[in-house]
Amino acid sequence: MGPTAEFLAPACRSRSPSLTGYHPDMYADALSFLEDERDAWRPYEDLFTLTPAQLEVPVAGPDHWSGRDLLGHLVFCQEYALDVARELAVGETSAALVRGEADWDARGDAVNDEAVAAWRAMPIEELLGRARTVPGELRGHLTVVPEARWLKNGEVQAFFAGETVDHYADHAHDLAVILAAVR
């Protein structure tokens, strides 16, 4: 099992100030993180079994999102993490991480609102295609990022957990409400 939620930075929609240094609840090895991420994402794949009409049904969950909205929101954050991983694979730092954090600090939930609107406008086939491929692509890129740049760096590890495993946990209730509403 991975780090505790109390240590890791909140997910995409509710960031807190950056964390520094090492914490004993951090992941000690990349494989554990990647396995936890894969296991945490798996329940969201149930959304792939819904029809396009079912994915569009808004529900009375915490965010009043449809399945489409939830997938778009999560993949938006995964793509952000993927951009960061790509940069860290070839360099010591990530300009995408700095830009994204600055944008979030300046605009907060407006970032999410714009992303959800963009994903709502996207053809459903494209959204599903990205939802099926981006998580694996992110995991693949993290395998080539030197561990010192993400796993052994408390701030960066907290970022990746906040965009993935912790974020998925934050939206587990949304997923349950969406699936219950359409089945």
Image (tube, rainbow, N blue to C red):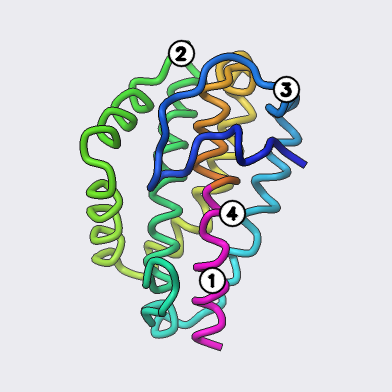
Q: Please tell me whether mark 4 sits on a helix, a strand or a loop.
A: helix
* Local crowd size for mark 4, using a 10 Å CA cut-off: few (<14), some (14–19), many (≥20): some
Of labels 4 and 2, earlier in sequence is 2
Instruction: Tell me what residue is drawn at x 70 percent, y 53 percent.
Output: 39
On residue 91, the disc is 2
Q: Quadrant of the N terminus?
A: top right
Q: Kindly identify the residue that appears in the image at 65 percent across and 59 percent down.
A: 42
Q: Nearer the viewer, residue 49 or 22?
A: 22
Above or below, 53 against 131 in this view is below
Residue 50 in percent (x, y) is at 51, 79
What amino acid is at disc 3?
Pro
Dominant SS type (magenta): helix
Label ID, residue 48: 1
Q: Disc 3 versus disc 1: distance between alpha carbons?
A: 37 Å
What quarter of the picture does the C terminus occupy? bottom right
Say which residue appears at 34% left-offset and 21% top-offset.
95
Which mark lies nearer to you, 4 or 3?
3
* Pointers 4 and 3 in contact (C-beta within 8 Å): no
Between marks 4 and 1 in the image, the one whose residue lies nearer the viewer: 4
**Alpha carbon separation for disc pair 4 and 2:** 30 Å
15 displayed left or right of 38: left
Q: Earlier in the sequence, mark 2 or mark 1?
A: 1
| Residue at the outermost front position | 6
The amino acid marked with disc number 1 is Phe
For the point 53% across and 54% down, the residue is: 170
Q: Secondary structure at mark 1?
A: helix
Amino acid type of the residue that numbered disc 4 sits on in the rendered structure: Ala
Q: Please say if the residues under marks 4 and 2 sit with CB atoms less than 8 Å apart.
A: no
